[in-house]
Image (cartoon, rainbow, N blue to C red):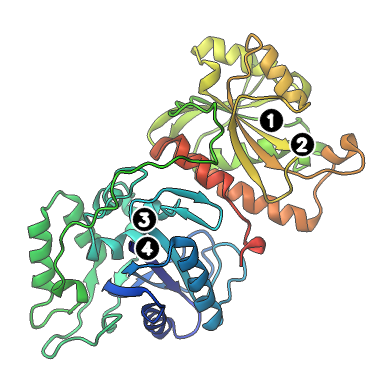
Amino acid sequence: MLTVIALGSNMGQSATTLKDAVTAINAIEGVSVIKASSLYRTPPVGYLDQDDFVNAVIMVESQPDPVALYERLAAIELEFGRVRLFKDGPRTLDLDIICAGDLISSDVRVILPHPRAQQRAFVLVPLNEIAPDLVFPDSGLTAAQALERLNPEDLSGIERIADAPSLLWAPLSGCQPIPYSVPAAAHAWAAGTSAPQRQQLHLQQAAPGNQCTLSAFISLQPASCGQLLTADPQRNANMPANANIRLIVGLGNVGAKYDHTRHNMGYDLLELIARRYNISLNPESKFAGLHGKGSIEGHEVHLLFPTTYMNESGRAVGPLCKFFKIAPEEILVLHDELDLAPGQMKLKFGGGLAGHNGLKSITAHLANSQDYYRLRIGIGKGPDTYSWVLGKPSPVDRALIEETLDAAAVDIGLIYTQGITRATSAINGFKPLAWQK
């Protein structure tokens, strides 16, 4: 099975680590490396106070299934002294399966395609070097098209390392490594150049005086992951195949004493979304809450925090939906969930209310319709429900919840870029760093 693997490191001798890791991957029984990108220096994403990363992408033919391959890659990470101190933090070696044939999988061990690969320049730039025509089976986008969708600032600071040889072989005689402008090449691919033109570009880069890369000497035939869609067990059976979310509601109680309590996790997530997409939340008396309108991934969306207190949240949601003609199935409600542990979250459509008073109120103001989306954020259970939900999480639980909220703020964008099924797979399959490996 044709499989794409991304490699990254920013601790120790990163370039040497990646080259040695490729050798180790090639030694896995039933795995053969067939293409490898150049090494790229990339700025960190998320946590910025750390060294730049060295990144690359390889393509392999793999007989082991993705889960078996994932387990072997995890073992290689450990063999290389893997250290990752926290989410988005520095690490000695990171190996991720990006795509495996035409598979779409929501297995919590290996979500395929990788849920964030199509948003990451440090994956897409090296991938475009070796397989711009590869198709992501969930979105139907080629690697080149996904790269084109990135903002120019996402490409800023990425450069091919001037003195780095290929991951597999040293440069050929007569070829001198030279600095390479990634944004210029990326935009050349994104501008709609044909496969023969891209191949010619590689050959020009491999001419004497230019940097030689493995991809310059391997045929760039389109490598498609296909269009096969498989059943997704993470999506509940009654969830619509498509979603048009026009309103996102974050539930909580108003007032400083409730800030960051367990019952306010919905509002905490709404704040992260508003910040991420630069949407201002302002008091709106006719909607009894803080309201903002803006764009999420090119789609107009309303954000709402009811200031009615949790038990009367519907008094805010009902009038807003009536005014803007928003149907129940176009609503996503963010709320805390006792039946999920801190570090877990689940996206669902419809179903019961599980005794949640905020959901009860919203349902009552939607003509008793329960046909809206909910993103349930785990807070766990305590000995007394009332004091538990109005209390603040322990430091350990808070760290798990914050990591969950950060991931959710990113994954909600997938609803608009890749669809509700893909977003559900990413959200429901999320695991905090402390639970991994």
- Name the residue that disc number 2 marks: 263
Q: Which quarter of the figure has residue 5?
A: bottom left
Upstream in sequence: badge 3 or badge 2? 3
Which residue type does callout 1 highlight?
Leu
Residue shown at the point (40%, 59%) measured from the top left: 98
The answer to whether one can see residue 309 in this image is: no
How far, Cα to Cα, is label 1 from label 2? 8 Å
Distance, label 4 to label 3, CA atoms, is 9 Å
Q: Name the residue under label 4.
A: 122
Q: Which amino acid does label 3 sit on?
A: Asp
Determine if residue 347 is in view. yes
First of labels 1, 4 by sequence position: 4
Q: Name the residue under label 1.
A: 251
Image marks 1 and 4: residues in contact by CB distance under 8 Å:
no
Residue assigned mark 3: 154
Where residue 140 appears, x then y in whole percent? 30, 43
Q: How far apart are marks 3 and 2 (CA)?
A: 35 Å
Label 2, residues with CA under 10 Å away: few <14, some 14-19, many ≥20: many
Task: Please name the amino acid that badge 4 sits on.
Answer: Phe
Please identify the quadrant where the N terminus is shown: bottom left
Q: Is residue 279 left or right of residue 102?
A: right
Whether tag 1 and tag 2 are in contact, CB under 8 A, the answer is: yes
In the displayed structure, 322 sits above or below 173; it is above
Mark 4 → mark 2, Cα distance in angstroms: 37 Å
Image point 61% across, 55% down: which residue?
Answer: 431
- Report helix, strand or loop for mark 4: helix
- For the view shown, which residue lies furthest in the bottom direction? 173
Question: Three-letter amino acid code at disc 2?
Answer: His
Decide which of tag 1 and tag 2 comes sooner along the chain: 1
